[in-house]
């Protein structure tokens, strides 16, 4: 099994420290970031810009608490498609991108084609969403739903030590 550092080839210890710090606090000033990683401001800023330009840092955003927003119903949905040729996969992928309630969509190698993480206000809203949206996505043949009872661990980005 490859170590984390070999999977991050091309990123030195300073780059990795920048990523860890910004994953914890994306609003950190460059001055504070430089002090935290032990570089001066100019090279730190240059490294951040390079990480942004190369796509390692994809962007910055506020993390919202879905529970406080009343979105505490989480369902994982196995989706089987009626067609798995490239055009069908592309149509499904594009359609999924347009649906706000779908937090995650993963193509799976297994007994089904996709695993979706869906967040809604409650079971009634989910049930309507399943019938009105999920079942109408391109090439959906069948679904199986698993409702989460509790989030034991949710991490936006694992540590990069």
Image (cartoon, grey):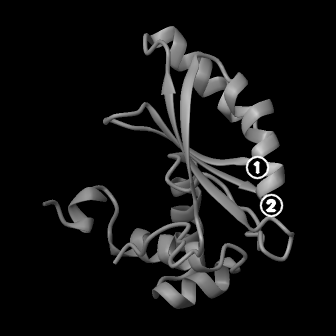
**Which numbered disc covers residue 126?**
1
Q: Nearer the viewer, residue 146 or 18?
A: 146
The image quadrant of residue 13 is: bottom left
Measuring from the top left, give residue 111's x and y in whole percent.
34, 34
Q: How many marks?
A: 2
Measuring from the top left, give residue 6's x and y in whole percent.
21, 61
Q: Residues within 10 Å of mark 1 (few under 14, many from 20)?
A: many
Image quadrant occupied by the N terminus: bottom left
Q: In the image, is residue 69 above or below residue 57?
A: below
Residue at 55% across / 35% down in the picture?
A: 143
Q: Nearer the viewer, residue 29 or 139?
A: 139
Residues under numbered marks 2 and 1 in contact, where contact means CB atoms less than 8 Å apart: yes
Q: In the image, is residue 85 above or below residue 151?
A: above
The image quadrant of residue 11 is: bottom left
Residue at 50% across / 76% down in the picture?
A: 153
Residue at label 2? 122
Instruction: Estimate the spatial distance between the alpha carbons at disc 2 and disc 1, rounded to whole Å.
Output: 6 Å
Residue at 58% across / 65% down in the picture?
A: 148
The residue sitting at the left extreme is 1
Q: Nearer the viewer, residue 42 or 14?
A: 14
SS of the residue at dot 2? loop
Measuring from the top left, give residue 26's x and y in whole percent.
67, 73
Image quadrant occupied by the C terminus: bottom left
Q: In the image, is residue 68 above or below residue 49?
A: below
Give the side of residue 48 with respect to residue 128, left or right: left
Q: Residues within 10 Å of mark 2 (few under 14, many from 20)?
A: few
Measuring from the top left, give residue 89's x and y in whole percent.
51, 19
**Which numbered disc covers residue 98?**
none
Q: Could one spot residue 66 in this view of the protein?
A: yes
Q: Could one spot residue 98 in this view of the protein?
A: no
């Amino acid at each position: 099994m490859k170590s984390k550092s070999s999977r991050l080839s091309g990123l030195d210890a300073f780059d990795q420290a920048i990523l860890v710090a910004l994953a914890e606090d994306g609003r950190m000033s460059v001055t504070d970031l430089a002090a935290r990683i032990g570089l001066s401001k100019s090279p730190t800023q240059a490294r951040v810009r390079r990480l942004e330009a190369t796509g390692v840092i994809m962007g910055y955003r506020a993390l919202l608490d879905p529970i406080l927003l009343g979105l505490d119903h989480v369902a994982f949905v196995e989706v089987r498609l009626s067609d798995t040729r490239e055009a069908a996969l592309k149509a499904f992928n594009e359609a999924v991108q347009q649906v706000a309630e779908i937090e995650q969509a993963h193509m799976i190698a297994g007994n089904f084609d996709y695993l979706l993480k869906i967040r809604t206000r409650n079971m009634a809203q989910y049930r309507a969403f399943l019938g009105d949206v999920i079942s109408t996505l391109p090439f959906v043949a069948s679904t199986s739903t698993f409702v989460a009872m509790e989030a034991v661990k949710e991490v936006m980005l694992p540590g990069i030590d």
